Amino acid sequence: MAKHNIPYVNLPAQGRDQMEDLKKIFEQVVLKGSFVGTHDDLAALEKRLAEYCGTAEAVALNSGTDALLLAMKIAGVGEGDEVITPPNSFVASTATIIQLGAKPVFADVLADQNIDPEKIAKAITPRTKAIMPVHLTGRICQMDEIMEIAHRHGLVVIEDAAQAIGSMYKGRLAGAIGHFGCFSAHPLKNLNALGDGGFVTTNDKAAAERMRRLRAHGMADRATIEEWGMVSRMDTLQAAILSYRLEKLPDVIAKRRDNAALYQKLLHHERMYVPTCRNEEFNTFHTFVVQVDKRDELQAHLKEIGIKTAIHYPVPIHLQPAAHALGHKKGDFPMTERQAERILTLPVNQYMSRADVETVASEVLAFLGR
Ligand SMILES: *Cc1c(COP(=O)(O)O)cnc(C)c1O
């Protein structure tokens, strides 16, 4: 038996907690008999999401990846265009740019792992069409600077807010600052479905209407195909579950912020970077990522004593085999590359007790003290 038993995530605990309510939702949806397509549960969820995120519209989709894809498509990103984005994200932000025939142009990140506005400014060319900042870990990027650059060059800003629902920057919510906000409801995200899910927020009503067409075969009505579309709608069961879980999201965020604050109080070491919260920020801590030397040894040690951690993400996108044709090499994005060797995601989920957080912190410090 390991000394501790602290999982990285605890979805079974969430399931146990909510089982009676989930069963009722399942029963209601099954008995209504409408599982995909336009339905009340979808419209109700979209209204709630738009309200929560502070935008005129939300469009529910089947994943955060399709949220990025459709937002860029509607923003006019296509063949030959360039989109500026960071190389340290989850792969979907770059992959969707490529799927549209456009070119990802990477800009390196700051110490806090978010895209560096100065590097964005330097990466702009006559072909640049859009900027896709990624609010990694639930911390919003430097959006004032980014929006200013975008206005100056006439660019669209598509926020990858997949990790940042409810996060704020100078009083503004993730997904309500750029032209489009793209969110994921993947089981590991803070607002999570029992499967894949995602949505786009925007204040552009015409764009939202077009997105609702494109997510369902491009149909204007049952007889009319307005343009070629795809199947990217969210199904009824996930929509009903997300409406229910959206009500619980403020508590989830509060608990994660409490856990993070306790880490921030306990974790001090000269060889470790610990994420802080700047005054203008409200971070939701989708992940709590420290940066530390001997990361692999620390992770292996924690695993051995029963503390599960993760790495988001071990190999930068520009160094992935799939990125070969983009022609990058090691050394192109030094901050991202250095962080990839030092980042470690500690468990911060809402099912951890204070004692669990204290245990993780003291074991990390004990290891580093050696
Ligand atoms: C999770 C995630 C996505 C993709 O969302 P899916 O719902 O899994 O398709 C995109 N970008 C980032 C930064 C993510 O964390």
Image (cartoon, rainbow, N blue to C red):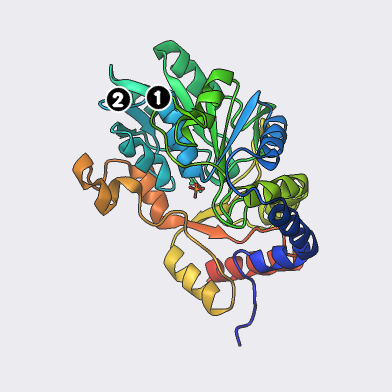
Q: Is residue 207 left or right of residue 53?
A: left
* Residue nearer the viewer, 241 or 135: 241
Residue 207, x across and y down, in percent = 52, 22
Q: In which quarter of the image is the N terminus?
A: bottom right
Residue at figure coordinates x 61%, y 49% from the top left? 35
Residue 116, x across and y down, in percent = 44, 32
In the rendered structure, which disc, 2 or 1, sits on the residue that comes first in sequence? Answer: 2
Residue 328 seen from this side: yes
Is residue 258 placed above or below 308 in the rendered structure? above
Q: In this view, does 360 lie to the left or right of 94?
A: right
User: What's the distance in space between the residues labelled 2 and 1, CA to CA?
Assistant: 8 Å
* Residue nearer the viewer, 280 or 240: 240
Q: In this view, does 55 lie to the left or right of 226?
A: right
- The mark found on residue 130 in the picture is 1
- The mark found on residue 81 in the picture is 2
**Circles 2 and 1 in contact, beta carbons < 8 Å:** yes
Q: In this view, does 4 lie to the left or right of 319?
A: right
Residue 36, x across and y down, in percent = 58, 46
Residue at figure coordinates x 42%, y 40% from the top left? 93
Which residue lies most toward the front here? 223
